[in-house]
Image: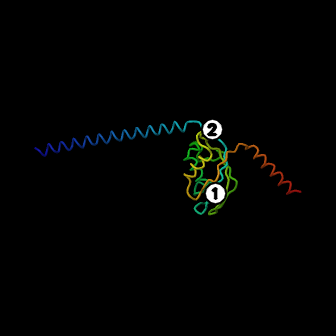
Amino acid sequence: MEKKIEEEKKTEEEKSNKEEEKNDKNIENSKTENEKNENQKKSKIKLPKRKYAIIHGYSGHNYSGNQKNPSVKTIEGELEKCLYEGGFISECNYGCIQKIDWMRASRTDKGVSAVMNVISVKLHKYPDLSENDMKNKINNLLPNDIKILELLKLVIDLILKIIIIIENIIILYLLFV
């Protein structure tokens, strides 16, 4: 008789423990859902975009070149991933660098390192972050063999395009004269 009573108590305790676990899981799920909703609200906030020049250096020993290639690990792939994780590229633009006006100054082959290379890209500008803070945030996300040396806001994009056109005209003139 006593054994039956003890067994009944154990089963009741087990049931109450299971119910508590379910309640705990429900609370955790509601917390994660609330966090997801907050993140979605943050991601829906329209942030202004600015054009930046990212001056970076890297050791290319662990990479298959600079230019993004979906099937292999590249410098641009790592940069884009860290810019996305840092919140500087929106989810709808991640994976399609043309949407953010990604332009590179040069390319490197597999295993080649660069002391300094430049890309220009449109990034979200957070009002409370300076360019130096942005650079530090991105550098913290990047692997140790890639570093952003400088992040410069490009205000005079049109002037840069005009300079490139003038340089091309001069080169063509020198080639044919």
Which quadrant of the figure has residue 114? bottom right
Disc 1, SS: strand
Q: CA distance from mark 2 to mark 1?
A: 27 Å
* Residue placed furthest toward the left: 1
Tell me residue 34's x, y (percent).
44, 37
Residue at image x 69%, y 45%? 154
Tell me residue 171's x, y (percent).
82, 55
* Residue placed furthest toward the right: 177
From the image, which quarter does the C terminus lie in? bottom right
Which amino acid lies under the numbered mark 1 shown in the image of this protein? Answer: Gly
Which quadrant of the figure has residue 11? top left
The residue that disc 1 covers is: 57
Q: Between residues 83 and 110, which one lies in front from this camera angle? A: 83
The residue that disc 2 covers is: 48
Tell me if residue 172 comes above or below residue 15 in the rendering. Answer: below
Report the side of 139 relative to 174 (left or right): left
Tell me if residue 50 comes above or below residue 140 in the rendering. Answer: above
